[in-house]
Image (spheres, rainbow, N blue to C red):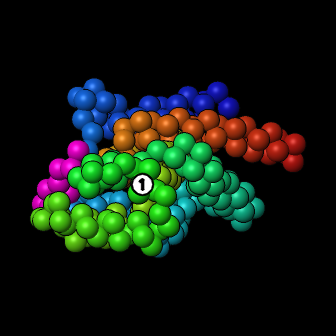
Amino acid sequence: MIKQLKQLTVGAILLLLPALLALAYGWHWKGEYNTVTDYPFYLFTQTVTRPWGILTSLILALVLYRHTTSSLRNVGALLLLIVVVVWGGQGIKSLLKPYFAEPRPYVVALMEAMHQTPDDFYQHPKSERQQLVRQAETFWPTLPNWQQRHWQHETGYSFPSGHSFFVASWLLLFYSLLSFRKSWPVLIIVTLWAWAVMWSRMLLGMHWPRDLIASVVIAWGFTFIVLVVHNVLSQRRS
């Protein structure tokens, strides 16, 4: 368990790097965009957005299975662990968002352009919020259609980041269950993917750096608790 905790913590520290770099440089999204450089990151963010997030989960589950176990009994345990950590984490995110009710960066910028407050935006139902987002092209004429559609798709609150929670849950599972020595190529690929998704959330005006940090910290704590319970139950069965 100590080894798992160390590996889990290494994964969490690596996950924090994009947000910590943004904080160190004092950067957050303020209405800027660049179609050429932003679109590849939009594609990364789509790997987590429904319905593609389901396909991503299936691929990651298969990779994790191939590197951790081959017995049918362990397959069931591994799948249960994945469901609890990944989808349980999404449940935590859904509970926290309305509690903190933090506006997204693009909402703050859009409402400032309209001489309104973020509270004015969130008092409307989703359909009316989507109509407000359609007016973004009035203030940003060169705003890409794909980015406007993405904003319309996600008009909810910002804190914590659900996409970051998703990639953090997966990466922490990989780091806690795989051998660093034997599986380092897989860990590098998953880490680069997670970094790209997390950076995309800031670059597209969806999240503040603090949203990402909170997601990683909460995911780390939740995953650790789940692993402790999993190990205790496994020892009792054996």
Residue at image coords 31%, 30%: 23
Mark 1: secondary structure: helix
Residue at image coords 87%, 48%: 237
Return the x and y of residue 39 as percentages of the image width and height.
21, 62
* Lateral position of residue 125 relative to residue 70, left or right: left
Residue 43 on the magenta span? no
Residue at image coords 17%, 54%: 33
Q: Which quarter of the picture shows residue 29? A: top left
For the residue pair 21 and 226, the one nearer the viewer reads as 21
Q: Which quarter of the picture shows residue 230? A: top right
* Lateral position of residue 153 relative to residue 196, left or right: right
Residue at image coords 63%, 55%: 91
Q: Which residue is mark 1?
A: 120
Mark count? 1
Q: Which residues are magenta?
A: 30-38
Return the x and y of residue 27 as percentages of the image width and height.
24, 35
